Image (tube, grey):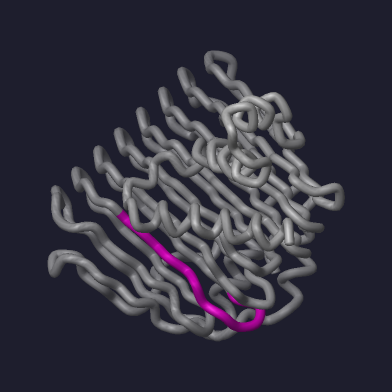
Amino acid sequence: MRELPSTPKIALARALKKAPAAAVPVGVTADAAVTRTFGLQVAPQDGLEDWLQGAGQTGVTLTVPAGYQGEPVFIQGPAEGSGLVHVVVAPGATVTLQDSWQGRGEHLAIGVWLEVGEDATVNWLTYDALAAESAVALRKATLAAGASLNWTVAGFSHNSGASLITCDLVGEGARATVNVGVLASGSQHLGYTTRMTNYGRKTGGHINQRGVITGAAHLIFNGIGHIVQGAQGADNQQENRVLMLAQEARGDANPILLIDENDVTAGHAASVTRIDQAQLYYLMSRGLSKALASRLVIRGFLEAGLAEIKDPQLKQTLFDTIDETLVNADA
């Protein structure tokens, strides 16, 4: 097996000792102009991708044509089994992409590869609400010159596992923002590694990760920003913030910057903390119960990671899940 991607404090090698559940065709709702081809057309780059595509796993490739200005593309993961998807957005296209995963099973594998062509714009929303025994997810975006990506990842699954989010800014002037909002509860053990790499000149990338932990759950956030040699004028920023609500909750926020070029800007912020008592006091002084005040503070905290979700029905679903989780935790 090829070398595994760097995932500080996440035991990825241990997770990959188990064979993934068989890949099942995903559901796709898209304009007729978006073509579908069985097969990934993606060569594995490391041990994780070998694992995802090994043992005859098959997937689907979706191609958004050049200059596309049509309807959003919806990808629905299977109810049972793993899923692999390759999305190619041709130059000059503008598209909204949403992938939703709510399946069950043992040792699920999710792989989504996105290629964004020159001067194309993608708004990408990922929603995870899995109920599997465990899951490993890789989502990887590659941007050409002048491409733009605004990506929100909502992690509301009930299983333990690892999620790796990779964004490669290859072409000059490419820009990307990755917002991650995660709720961990019960005895979950979750690891999120979000990597932003500036390869091209004058590229810009921002990682914003927010996590809330209840019960005895453990959540790890790794943020990796890498500006390679030759990427003059690049910018790479990140925030990793974790809010713990219980004594047994455990959280890690690990910001990592790798800078191989001089003419660049980069920065990071990280925090692992308990709920703000001053905010609670202010809300309770206005007549709110402690339980309701806590939920409002937590909603506000996660909103920074989920602010780009425009679908009101999905946002309400996420907030209903937050409320239900917190009520169960207090019971």
Residue visible at 60% across and 74% down in the picture: 131
Task: Tell me, yes or no, if residue 264 can be seen here.
Answer: yes
> x, y (%) of residue 272?
75, 35
Q: In which quarter of the image is residue 208?
A: top right
Residue visible at 51% across and 63% down in the picture: 128
> x, y (%) of residue 125?
40, 53
Instruction: Say how many tags the image has.
Output: 0
- Image quadrant in which the C terminus is located: bottom right
Q: What stretch is highlighted in magenta?
A: 97-108
> x, y (%) of residue 110?
53, 69
**With respect to residue 127, does 202 lie above or below?**
above
| Residue closest to the far top | 263
Q: Is residue 107 left or right of residue 205?
A: right
Q: Is residue 297 left or right of residue 97?
A: right
* Nearer to me, 100 or 45: 100
Residue visible at 36% across and 74% down in the picture: 60
Is residue 102 inside the magenta stretch?
yes
Task: Tell me, yes or no, if residue 259 can be seen here.
Answer: no
- Image quadrant in which the N terminus is located: bottom right
* Nearer to me, 221 or 140: 221
**With respect to residue 306, does 323 lie above or below?**
below
**With respect to residue 301, does 285 lie above or below?**
above
> x, y (%) of residue 259?
64, 25
Residue visible at 57% across and 80% down in the picture: 104
Is residue 182 inside the magenta stretch?
no
